[in-house]
Image (cartoon, rainbow, N blue to C red):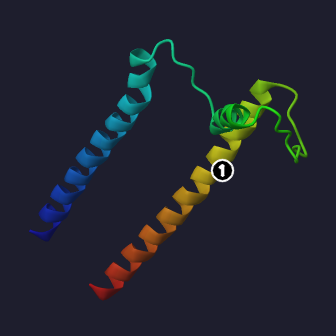
Amino acid sequence: MQTEAIRQTKKNNLSVNLLLILIIIALAIIPLFTAKDAEFGGADGQAEEAIAEINADYEPWFSPIFEPKSGEIESLLFALQAAIGAGIIGYGLGYLKGRRKKEDEKSA
């Protein structure tokens, strides 16, 4: 009886996870079709434009320590940074979930 409830809960969780993955994929793909001529840029570029609008004579007081030689390398480093961050967050969440599962097993 209890195993049937656990099996049904796992099946529901799988359905919810698949639905969430499909929503995420749709959120990533839909803008590519709805905003065909849009420029996709980062916050740095938008901030630079906003500063130039406010004060055209503004000169940055700081320059980056390391500046990649090309945009592709910059994108690669950004993607690597995002992947490392996602890995750390995923590891933390998995660790917490495993710890909770272990505590639940001890109390049962």
* 40 is higher (above) or lower (below) than 97: above
Does 85 sit left or right of 24 as displayed?
right
Outermost residue to the top: 37
Mark 1: which amino acid?
A: Ile
Does 80 sit left or right of 18 as displayed?
right
Residue named by callout 1: 84
Q: Position of residue 100 (x, y in %)?
A: 39, 76
Snapshot quadrant of residue 46: top right
Outermost residue to the left: 1
Report the number of numbered marks. Answer: 1
- Pick the quarter of the image with the C terminus: bottom left
Q: Secondary structure at mark 1?
A: helix
Q: Nearer the viewer, residue 38 or 61?
A: 61
* 84 is higher (above) or lower (below) than 38: below
Q: Nearer the viewer, residue 34 or 49?
A: 49
Q: Nearer the viewer, residue 52 or 97?
A: 52
Task: Name the residue rendered at 52%, 18% in the picture.
Answer: 38
* 9 is higher (above) or lower (below) than 80: below
Snapshot quadrant of residue 80: top right
Task: Name the residue rendered at 62%, 53% in the picture.
Answer: 85
Q: Position of residue 19 (x, y in %)?
A: 27, 40
Q: Position of residue 77 (x, y in %)?
A: 75, 38
Q: Position of residue 1 (x, y in %)?
A: 8, 68
Outermost residue to the bottom: 107
Task: Name the residue rendered at 44%, 30% in the picture.
Answer: 28
Packing grade of label 1 (10 A; few <14, some 14-19, many >=20) is: few
Task: Name the residue rendered at 65%, 35% in the picture.
Answer: 50
